[in-house]
Amino acid sequence: MSSSKISPRTIGCGRIHPCLPALFLTLFATGASAEEQGILMEAMSGAPSLLNDTFTATLGSFILESDTKVRLDGSSGQGTEINWSDSFGGGDGTRFRVDGAWRFGDSRRHKLRGMWFNFSQNRSAEFDREINWGDATFPINTTIESVYEFDIYELAYEYAFLRRENLELSGSFGLHLAQFKVGLSAEVETGGGTGTAEIGDEGKLNAPLPVIGGRAIWRISGDFWLDAMVQFFALEYENVDGRLIDTRIGVLWQPKKWGGIGIGYNRFDMDVDVARERYTGKLDWIYDGPQIFYSVSF
């Protein structure tokens, strides 16, 4: 009786050992749920996916509407509250938002997320009333120059408690750091009208606010995605009393890993009362408006 031998070439993959990874994945997928199989197959396809890619980032700009009320108190008493939007108007300025996320872990449920928002503007306006600003007093009918700079930084951890083939629901907690600088200055006549002098004052604020939130990512169809997020918190600690609400929703078209574009809406509401050395006063700031952004996902 002759003995038969099986050649490695009869397996269909060239040799046995190159087939082992594919065999392992097949066995794994067989025991997985339908949703998990779909997620696994999409990750293996190489197409961009907000549900599986390790890194995602967006860069956007706003058509911004803001409602800002600011008061800077001085050593002699409470300052004048100024509605910044009504007093100085919109005007030229910079406004952008950068978001990024790193997905890690074998389960693909964990993410670290970062964000930076910037809005800065220099404007001037004439006031028909006396303005008390910090330790400076501006007379009636004075043209006042303003400096307004606002930065928001965020670092958060996000966990996906529900993952499906086309949907992910997550909860998050993190920290917002709001850095705020606002100042007023003007040239005024000295006593007797013999010359002019510059007067002014400015306040600076660093307000760390912890936040919790939720997020939903939904694949609408093909390369189109819906991304919605809300974050909120209120804090009263030492000399800071504040609250924060941040909501954002956007529709994204991501046909390529390095090429996606989206439109969305963002509203940020922050109300802080502060009594500190470099800023004593009140900041009530709301911005909202449509956003257009570029995205990558790989």
Image (spheres, helix red, strand yellow):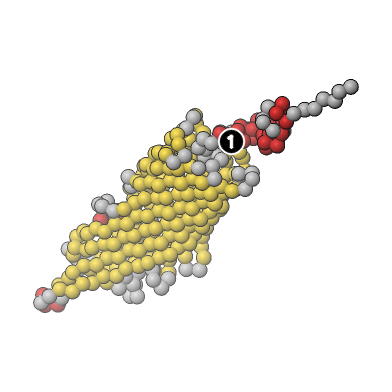
Residue positioned 21% across, 67% down in the render: 186
Q: Is residue 99 above or below residue 72?
A: above
Whole-percent x and y of residue 32? 69, 34
What's under tag 1, amino acid-wise? Met
Q: Quadrant of residue 275?
A: bottom left
Is 27 left, or right, of 171 in this rendering? right
Residue positioned 41% across, 45% down in the render: 266
Whole-percent x and y of residue 26? 69, 32
Q: Quadrant of residue 29?
A: top right
Residue positioned 10% across, 77% down in the render: 194
Nearer to us in this view, 17 or 121: 17
Q: Residue furthest top?
A: 1
Nearer to us in this view, 65 or 103: 103
Residue positioned 43% across, 64% down in the render: 206
Q: Pointer 1: what residue?
A: 44
Say whether residue 119 is visible: yes
Is 161 left, or right, of 220 in this rendering? right
